[in-house]
């Protein structure tokens, strides 16, 4: 079959599964699950992959990870891993849709938490299920193997647990067969149906930081009889604002403290205060420098009589799209959405642990626009008058257009076929 003919068939099959993809997405959105708790999501995924008659459906990987293996009927040595993340966020759902989540996870560490798919992972999972359906329908014409990778805990598991992309790698999910390419996409507030790409660092390096400042507990009426950790905490929070002046201003970094946890009550000077936060760097080599300076800053708590310990957890490398891989992928993206809808974007200090796959196996990670927006003169998304607005990921009001999900299905299917046939392969090997 000519390549243009099979591409047309992939599109026809994607259109045929579009309604089911929307139904999956709405079901998942209504029933979200937090990181390392994706029990029902993984069950839904595995049941459908088995119904498709894949060669293997592997479950329970690094918690609730699922990998479906589809071996093509034509000879071929290439292996493409298509990835979707499954977990939701501890964020209240204010998207306004009739399928909005009302889930509350009362047992999650640190909870109870409202739970919602405010980052669009429901879209990713549904689109990849659609792509599995499409590709299983043409399996006899695939020269190689497709891995459908449904990953848990992309948002990070509880700090006492393991999980995420690296845990899947370490569990041997990609040992047999070994991918020759990894591909994934992330829905964003870009215009509906647009594909955004970047050569170089698309998502930054990240690490979770935990700072424990320890004093000596006493009654609030006699602070001189103890050591108040609060002044030291205040100094740390204030000092973080100066860390930016200690690294190059041309390479963005950020240190954000998102949660302060103390032990005490209104009339007690507590023993400890714990700061939870995140460090992000556009250039991975800056991470060690920022960590050293943040640790030094925290250790200056001794000036207040307190002590501090600093831990860096759940480190994630940046997502890097190499030039040769982007060059190889652009013809596929342009065929799927049209040349005018494939745009180069700036980098972001958001993170995505798909980097663990792309850095090991080569490949690409792109953004798929799903909102009522257009691009301004500088190429940035802005709201369309009369639309639903522009709402960033992780915002309680984040929304995604259902009609755009089929574009995600087509991207996965076209990328997989093109890689297996050798059309999407870097000329220098990546």
Image (cartoon, rainbow, N blue to C red):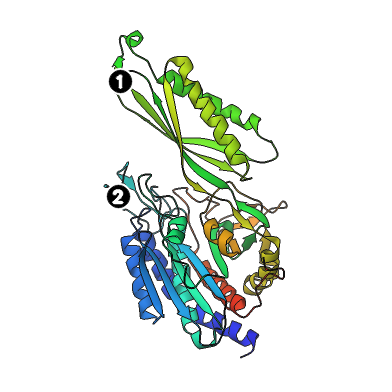
> Which x, y percent locates residue 115?
36, 51
Give me the C-alpha separation between circle 2 and circle 1.
28 Å
N-term-proximal mark, 2 vs 1: 2
Tell me the number on the disc at residue 266. Answer: 1
Q: Could you tell me which secondary element the residue under label 2 belongs to?
A: strand
Q: Nearer the viewer, residue 281 or 339?
A: 281
Query: As displayed, is residue 155 above or below residue 58?
Result: above
Quadrant of the image containing the C terminus:
bottom right
Of residues 178 and 18, which is closer to you in this image? 178
Q: Are marks 2 and 1 in contact (CB under 8 Å)?
A: no
Residue at horizontal 46%, vertical 61%?
169
Residue 5 point in image, percent of width and height: 62, 87
* Residue 101 vs residue 322, the one in the foreground: 322
Q: Position of residue 285 (x, y in %)?
A: 63, 43
Position of 356 compared to 46: left or right?
right
Q: Dot 2 corresponds to which residue?
A: 105
Asked if residue 277 is positioned above or below residue 10 in the image, the reply reads: above
Q: Residues within 10 Å of mark 2 (few under 14, many from 20)?
A: some
Residue shown at the point (64%, 40%) measured from the top left: 252
Q: Residues within 10 Å of mark 1 (few under 14, many from 20)?
A: few
Residue that lies at the very extreme toward the bottom in this rendered image: 1
**Taking 396 as reference, is 352 left or right?**
right
């Amino acid at each position: 079959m000519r390549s243009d003919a099979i591409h047309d068939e992939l599109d026809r099959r994607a259109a045929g599964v579009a309604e089911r993809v929307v139904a999956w997405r709405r079901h998942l959105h209504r029933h979200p699950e937090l990181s390392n708790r994706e029990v029902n999501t993984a069950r839904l995924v595995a049941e459908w992959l088995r119904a498709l008659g894949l060669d293997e459906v592997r479950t329970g990987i690094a918690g609730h990870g699922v990998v479906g293996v589809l071996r093509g009927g034509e000879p071929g040595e290439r292996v493409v891993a298509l990835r979707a993340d499954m977990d939701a966020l501890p964020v209240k759902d204010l998207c306004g849709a009739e399928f909005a989540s009302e889930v509350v996870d009362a047992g999650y560490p640190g909870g109870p938490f409202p739970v919602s798919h405010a980052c669009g992972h429901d879209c990713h999972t549904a689109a990849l299920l659609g792509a599995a359906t499409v590709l299983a329908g043409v399996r006899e014409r695939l020269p190689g193997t497709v891995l459908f990778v449904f990953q848990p805990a992309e948002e990070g598991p509880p700090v006492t647990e393991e999980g995420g992309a690296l845990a899947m790698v370490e569990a041997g999910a990609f040992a047999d067969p070994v991918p020759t390419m990894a591909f994934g996409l992330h829905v964003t507030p870009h215009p509906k149906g647009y594909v955004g790409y970047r050569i170089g660092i698309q998502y930054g390096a990240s690490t979770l930081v935990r700072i424990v400042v320890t004093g000596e507990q006493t009654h609030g009426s006699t602070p001189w009889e103890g050591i108040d950790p609060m002044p030291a905490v205040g100094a740390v929070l204030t000092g973080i604002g100066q860390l930016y002046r200690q690294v190059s201003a041309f390479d963005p970094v950020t240190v954000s403290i998102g949660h302060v946890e103390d032990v005490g009550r209104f009339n007690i000077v507590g023993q400890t205060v714990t700061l939870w936060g995140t460090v992000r760097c556009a250039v991975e080599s800056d991470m060690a420098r920022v960590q050293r300076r943040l640790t030094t800053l925290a250790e200056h708590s001794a000036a207040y009589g307190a002590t501090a310990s600093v831990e860096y957890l759940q480190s994630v490398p940046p997502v890097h799209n190499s030039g040769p891989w982007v060059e190889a992928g652009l013809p596929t993206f342009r065929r799927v959405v049209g040349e005018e809808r494939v745009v180069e974007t700036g980098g972001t200090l958001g993170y995505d642990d798909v980097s663990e796959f792309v850095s090991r196996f080569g490949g690409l990670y792109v953004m798929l626009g799903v909102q009522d927006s257009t691009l301004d003169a500088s190429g940035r998304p802005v709201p369309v008058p009369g639309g639903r607005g522009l709402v960033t990921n992780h915002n309680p009001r984040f929304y995604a257009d259902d009609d755009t999900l089929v574009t995600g299905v087509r991207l996965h299917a076209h990328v997989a076929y093109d890689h297996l046939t050798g059309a999407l392969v870097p000329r220098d090997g990546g």
